[in-house]
C-alpha cells in the first residue's frame, strides 16, 4: 500500500527533527521517519545512579535561531548557561594551564612564545593571501603563525570540535570564517572584525549551554510537537523517482514494509546511508559520499566522590595536545558547569578518547576505556581513589570530517542533487557539526522545501 505526504524527512536526529517541525509549523503535511526506537540521533541524555549523563554532545553554543526555537517550543526557561568565566585548561609540560581567551591574555601568556606573538602582530598589521589550493588547518596555522600555536592550542581545539586531524582537515570547509576573513582583508583579525561589523543583526555573544534535564530536552519537546508525524523504528530502505517527479520511498518498520510517495524528500541521515539511498537514483552519488571520513569517539563518563579529587575542578575542563602522549583528547567537568549532573558530594567528568589520530582506541572494551581514562586523568587531577561510577559510550561514526577536498565533494553532491528537484539534504556534514549549525541549516532547508512545494 502506498500513502502520500507532501514532504518526507528521513532521519530523526536534531537536523531531521527541526526540519520536520519547521515544515509542519508552516502548514506542510510533513512526515518524519527514524530508524531507531528513539529520536535524537547522537543527542542522548540518560540518568543513572543519580548522574545525568550526556552520551554524545555535552553542551551546545547558542545561536540566534536556536534561541528563537527554544522560545517557540516553550523551553527557553529550561536553558542553563555554563559559567561565563569558567577557565578552560590545556595540558602543557604535565600541568593544566589556563587557555588565554582574550587578546591581552594571549599576549601575556607564557604558553605562547615570542615568534608566535610577533606573527599575530604581523597578521593584525600586515597582509597575506590564502593559496588557491585547499589548505589544511595545520598548514594554515604554520603559514600564518607557528608550529607551537598548532601544537598547543589549535590542534587541541580542533580535536575538541571534530575529533579530527589538523593535517587533514580543510581550513576552508571546517573553519570557513577564518578562510573568508583572510581572503577579504588579508588578515584574520581585521577580516573577522569586518565580518562581525557587516552582520546586520545585533551581535550576540555565543553562550555555552544545556538544559536543566540535559540536551535531550530539545529532542523530547520536538518529538512531542511532531506527535504522530514522527514514526520511530521505521527506516528508509529504498528510493525511486516516479515519472510525475514525486519520490517513492520504501519503508521498513515494525509492521513490515510499505511505500510512501512524496513531492519533497529530505534526507537527514549520516553520509553512508544518504550515499547508499541516493545511489539508487544515480550511481554518481556514491563516490563523493563514500569519500567523507568519520571519526570514531568513545565518551567516557566517570563519577568521583569530591573528597577523592585533589583538584578544585573549577573550570570547563581541559584539552590535551597530541604531543603530550596521552590517549585522552580532553575532559569536560560536567558537574562544574551545570547543576544536577552528579549526586550530592560527587563530581562527574566526561572524557573523549579516539578521534582520527587514534582510530583504534574506540575498538577497546568499555572497561579498558574507563580504566585508561582514570589512569590518565587521575595524576592530572590528583585523584585519591578509583571512580565511584563509570559509563562508556562508543560512537564508531561520531563526527564527519571536513577533510581536504570536502568543498569539491559538496559541490559535486549539490550539482547531482539539482537534477532531482524536490530532493534536499540536511545534516552535520554540510555546514558544520555543531548542534546550532545543524539547526540553522535544517531551518534553511525547510524554507527551501516550502518554496518548492508552493511553486
Ligand atoms: C561524541 C559527540 C560529541 C559531540 N559534542 C558536541 C558538542 O559538544 N556540541 C555540539 O554542538 N555538537 C556536538 N556534537 C555534534 C552534534 O551532536 C551532531 O553533529 C548533531 O547532533 C548531528 O545531528 P544530525 O541530525 O545531523 O545527525 P544524527 O544525530 O546522526 O541523526 C541521524 C539520524 O538518522 C537516523 N537514520 C539513519 N539511517 C536511517 C534510515 N535509513 N531511515 C531512517 N532514519 C535513519 C539515525 O538513526 C539518526 O537518528 C557531538 C557529537 C558526538 C557524536
Image: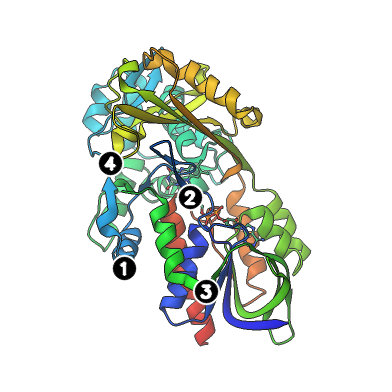
Tell me the CA gap for discs 3 and 1.
19 Å
Return the disc, 3 or 1, that comes first in the chain's sequence.
Answer: 1
Return the disc, 1 or 2, that comes first in the chain's sequence.
Answer: 2
Q: Read off the residue under disc 1.
A: 72
Q: Is mark 2 within 8 Å of ligand 1?
A: yes
Quarter location, residue 354:
top right
- Which residue is at a point 61% across and 54% down the rendered structure image? 270
Return the disc, 1 or 4, that comes first in the chain's sequence.
Answer: 1
Label 3: which secondary element: helix
**The label number, if any, that marks residue 82 in the structure image:** 4
Label 1: which secondary element: helix
Graded by Cα atoms within 10 Å as few (under 14), some (14 to 19) or many (20 or more), the crowding at tag 4 reads many
Compared with residue 303, is residue 133 higher up or lower down, i.e. above or below? below
Tell me the CA gap for discs 1 and 4.
22 Å
**The label number, if any, that marks residue 292 in the structure image:** none
Return the disc, 2 or 3, that comes first in the chain's sequence.
Answer: 2
On screen, residue 270 versus residue 314, left or right, reads: right
Label 2: which secondary element: loop
Return the disc, 4 or 2, that comes first in the chain's sequence.
Answer: 2
Tell me the CA gap for discs 2 and 3.
20 Å
The answer to whether one can see residue 193 in this image is no
- Which residue is at a point 31% across and 48% down the rendered structure image? 212
Graded by Cα atoms within 10 Å as few (under 14), some (14 to 19) or many (20 or more), the crowding at tag 2 reads many
Mark 2 against mark 3, which lies toward the viewer? 3
Report x, y in % for residue 97. 32, 20
Q: Read off the residue under disc 2.
A: 43
Q: Read off the residue under disc 3.
A: 229
Mark 3 against mark 4, which lies toward the viewer? 3
Amino acid at each position: 500500500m502506498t500513502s502520500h505526504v507532501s514532504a518526507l524527512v528521513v532521519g530523526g536526529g536534531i537536523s531531521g527533527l527541526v526540519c520536520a517541525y519547521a515544515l509542519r509549523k508552516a502548514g506542510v503535511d510533513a512526515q518524519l521517519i527514524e530508524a531507531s526506537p528513539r529520536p535524537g540521533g547522537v543527542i542522548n541524555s540518560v540518568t543513572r545512579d543519580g548522574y545525568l549523563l550526556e552520551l554524545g554532545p555535552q553542551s551546545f553554543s547558542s545561536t540566534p535561531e536556536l534561541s528563537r526555537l527554544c522560545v517557540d517550543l516553550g523551553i527557553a526557561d529550561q536553558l542553563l548557561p555554563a559559567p561565563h568565566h569558567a577557565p578552560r585548561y590545556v595540558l602543557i609540560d604535565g600541568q593544566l594551564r589556563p587557555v588565554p581567551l582574550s587578546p591581552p591574555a594571549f599576549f601575556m601568556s607564557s604558553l605562547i612564545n615570542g615568534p608566535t606573538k610577533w606573527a599575530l602582530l604581523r597578521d593584525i598589521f600586515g597582509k597575506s593571501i590564502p593559496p588557491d589550493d585547499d589548505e589544511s588547518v595545520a598548514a594554515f596555522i604554520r603559514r600564518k603563525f607557528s608550529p607551537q600555536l598548532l601544537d598547543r592550542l589549535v590542534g587541541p581545539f580542533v580535536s575538541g570540535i571534530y575529533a579530527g586531524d589538523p593535517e587533514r582537515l580543510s581550513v576552508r570547509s571546517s573553519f570557513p570564517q577564518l578562510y573568508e576573513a583572510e581572503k577579504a582583508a588579508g588578515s584574520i583579525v581585521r577580516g573577522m572584525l569586518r565580518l562581525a561589523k557587516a552582520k546586520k543583526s545585533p551581535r550576540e555573544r555565543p553562550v555555552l549551554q544545556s538544559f536543566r534535564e540535559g540536551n535531550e530536552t530539545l529532542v523530547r519537546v520536538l518529538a512531542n510537537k511532531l506527535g504522530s508525524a514522527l514514526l520511530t523504528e521505521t527506516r528508509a530502505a529504498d528510493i525511486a523517482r516516479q515519472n510525475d517527479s514525486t519520490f517513492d520511498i520504501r519503508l521498513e518498520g515494525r509492521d513490515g514494509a510499505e511505500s510512501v510517495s512524496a513531492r519533497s524528500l529530505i534526507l537527514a541521515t549520516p553520509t553512508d546511508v544518504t550515499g547508499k539511498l541516493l545511489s539508487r537514483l544515480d550511481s554518481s552519488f556514491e563516490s563523493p559520499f563514500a569519500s567523507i571520513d568519520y571519526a570514531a569517539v568513545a565518551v567516557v563518563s566517570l563519577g568521583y566522590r569530591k573528597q577523592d579529587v585533589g583538584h578544585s575542578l573549577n573550570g570547563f575542563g581541559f584539552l590535551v595536545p597530541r604531543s603530550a602522549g596521552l590517549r585522552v583528547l580532553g575532559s569536560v567537568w560536567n558537574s562544574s558547569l551545570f547543576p544536577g549532573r552528579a549526586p550530592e558530594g560527587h563530581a562527574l567528568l566526561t572524557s573523549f578518547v579516539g578521534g582520527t589520530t587514534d582510530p583504534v582506541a574506540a575498538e577497546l572494551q568499555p572497561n579498558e576505556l574507563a580504566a585508561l581514562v582514570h589512569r590518565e586523568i587521575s595524576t592530572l587531577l590528583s585523584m585519591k581513589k578509583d571512580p565511584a561510577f563509570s559509563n562508556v559510550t562508543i560512537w564508531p561514526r561520531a563526527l564527519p570530517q571536513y577533510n581536504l577536498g570536502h568543498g569539491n565533494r559538496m559541490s559535486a553532491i549539490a550539482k547531482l542533487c539539482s537534477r532531482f528537484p524536490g530532493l534536499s539534504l540536511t545534516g552535520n556534514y554540510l555546514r558544520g557539526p555543531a548542534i546550532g549549525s545543524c539547526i540553522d541549516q535544517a531551518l534553511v532547508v525547510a524554507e527551501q522545501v516550502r518554496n518548492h512545494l508552493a511553486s
